[in-house]
Image (cartoon, coloured by chain):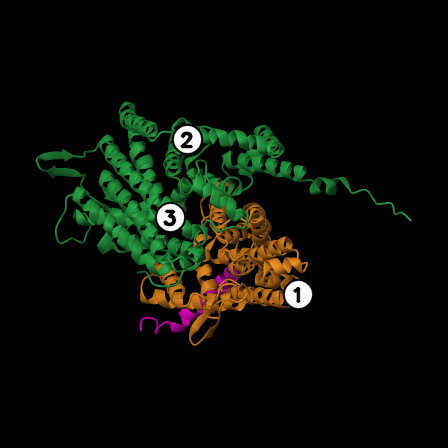
Chain colours: A orange, B green
Amino acid sequence: MCFTQNFWNLVVSGLYDGFLYALIALGYTLVYGVLQLINFAHSEVFMSGGFASYFILHALVGTNQPTGLASVGYVALGVLGGGAGGAAIAFLLERVAYRPLRRRNAPRLAFLISAIGASYFLYNLAGKEFGRNALEIPTLFTNGPVFSVFGATVQTIYVVTAIAALIMLVIVDRVVAMTRLGKGIRAVAQDAETASLMGVPIDRVISQTFIIGGLLGGAAGFLFGLNAGVIFTMGFTPALKAFTAAVLGGIGNIRGAVLGGLLLGIVENLGVACTQASWRDVVAFGILVLVLLIRPTGLLGEQLGRAA
Amino acid sequence: MSTVRAPTPLLRRLWLSTDARRLAACVAGGLVLAVMTGPEGSGTAPTSGFTGSLGNSRVIGFVVFGVVLWLLMTARQRYGTEIRAVSDRLSAAPRRLLPDKRVRGVFYLVLLGIAIGYPTVLNGFWQEVLVDQIGVYVLLALGLNVVVGYAGLLDLGYIAFYAIGAYSAAYWTGALPVHPLFHLNAFYAIPLAVLAAMLAGVILGAPTLRLRGDYLAIVTLGFGEIIEIVANNLQGVTGGAQGVIGIPHFSIHFLGVVYHWGLGSLPYYYLLLGFIVVVLIAFHFLENSRVGRAWVAIREDEVAAESSGINVLKYKVMAFAIGASTSGLAGMVEASKIGFVEPGDFTVQLSILILVLVIFGGMGSLPGAVIGAAVLQFLPQYLRVHPLFGFQQQDLYLYLGAILVVMMIFRPVGVFPSRRRKRELGLAEHGVGSADAMESTTGPIS
């Protein structure tokens, strides 16, 4: 087979992509859980996180090259800053593009159109205000091989991304499973009307869901930017793939989104080995179409939502 | 025993008052508009755009704009019934002025006369705009209107069918690296290009239209992207990123009639006008046919439609295919007019542009689609020649995105709504019916 030669290298880089997809996919899946809607503007939440962390780190780090503990601190700061940027945009997005429609009980078509509009508005605004060229996030650590598995070298950036992502994924999983907020999210996802009759403040829960999704998406924007830089159009493709990941794992299902993300990352990288790099996106979209046709409920099944 | 209640703090009282919150939102809207129309920033000076937009006297105008907006909204709320009565009478006016079918027919003929006569007095630039920017997009908007407006489906990869039409044109006239069995005159390739786009619509639609509507949106978005990537990468078939040149202009040799469409825009304008009129008439009858009524039923209540014996999937695929073939037709005409095709002409954002044209005019309304497309396509060109309000071409999609959100919040039926659509949306907002086709569909097409 075309990928057997580099198999483990491809798996490692696939896992790296996969962790990013998983972080973004959680935003889709959580919002889908409470609203039964695809948040088409989630790509711009991701982008805002990238830009927020860029400006914070650019101001603090500049051209210095931090090492050791300082590196760890700056990475944590980048994650937090990106998360805060993403959360702020996600919150505003819900307030401006979703809530007025929800109040009016608008049809789903209207929500999708409004979200697409918000997405185009946001990324073009970023392009206008921050320039249309890619910006490089300052170097926070020296990238290089750390260790190897089955002959595949693992770079520092892979380790950083995996650790950051794992921590966040575990926290979110626990928050949704164990806290009062998580209970609210699950209640709204199961049946919003009944939840509201039981005293769950739906508006607040939905806002908080957007914020959690925004935190993860924004942090993913930073982690993505570490490697690839930030640019106003950076959201479109990763977000579309993360959506694929969410569907692959079963939309509304948190663990499904993580599984779907990792799986999609690996399959995409193996698939690219068989074709050319330029066909990369086609491989991912092909997977999306196949999943939707063969098993639209995803691998682990739809869980949070009651959507049929 | 009585307790003395502490007075609510002023800020909290303000926050609780709808008027104050609405005023804040209106002023915020004005400030956003100030930033949108303001100068550009850059990566090295990320705040310069904002300070340039908000840090000088021009911001006063936008704040005033916000306040005026708030006053208008408040007035509308207070005198809502009166205003609605007036606006209803105004919107009913054309109908009352044109009560008779014959009078209406004359009116349409006059409009057609203007559409035929007026372009001859325009200069070359505007004639070109009339074809490349307006005519083609009116046709595209009419096609998407069938999908979004009539059937209530969201197709975000609509431009892919335009690409298929354009590349079919290139294929049948022998401009592509792969050669067809027999070469065709561009004019006679039109049916084949339309057929190819329609087939693509059916092939993509038949499996994906079973899915929930939001999945359809994302699959079509992916499809639009794939078509662009394929066109870019299949060097041997599509000519790759440079595209292909040498698609001949239309010409007719038929029963002694010989006519060549040359480099000028006007002949293409009249050809497009002909297509648009035919499509308009066809869609008008379609809307009021059995098929049109099936679409209405599906939009209003998919489950009820299905249980009344309507083959929901069949009618969805039909709408999708009709939209696709209209898009293919537009692609064919444009390819022949400009003589080349390249993947850069088929970016995903063009699908969004056409969606804005349909939404702005009014989903499901034929005059809405035509006027919406004409106005929104004309404006950027006008602003290109006469720069106003700090409008810059590269910010076009910033404005289009804002239009989508604002329309969805304040006027989801569009500027020139179809009466039926308006009623449906109103009903859906009161919990009756759905006004879209977002359910998943099962069962075979027969």
Quick check: can you spot residue A193? yes
Dot 2 falls on a residue whose secondary structure is helix
Contact flag, marks 3 and 2 (Cβ < 8 Å): no
Dot 1 falls on a residue whose secondary structure is loop
Left or right, A63 with reference to B325? right
- The span shown in magenta is A1-26
Quadrant of residue A186 within the rendered picture = bottom right
Inspect the magenta stretch and tell me whether residue B328 lies in it. no
Identify the residue under disc 1. Answer: A179
Figure quadrant of the C terminus of chain B: bottom left
> What residue type is disc 1 on?
Thr
User: A188 or A177, which is in the foreground?
Assistant: A188
Q: Main structural element of the magenta stretch: helix, strand or loop?
A: helix
> What residue type is disc 2 on?
Arg
Identify the residue under disc 3. Answer: B293
Write down the chain letter for disc 3: B
Residue that extends furthest to the left in the rendered view of this protein: B256
Contact flag, marks 1 and 3 (Cβ < 8 Å): no
Badge nearest the viewer, 1 or 3? 3
Percent x, y of residue B199: 27, 54
Badge 2: residue crowd in 10 Å (few <14, some 14–19, many ≥20): few
Taking the spot 54% from the left edge, 61% from the top edge, the residue there is A33
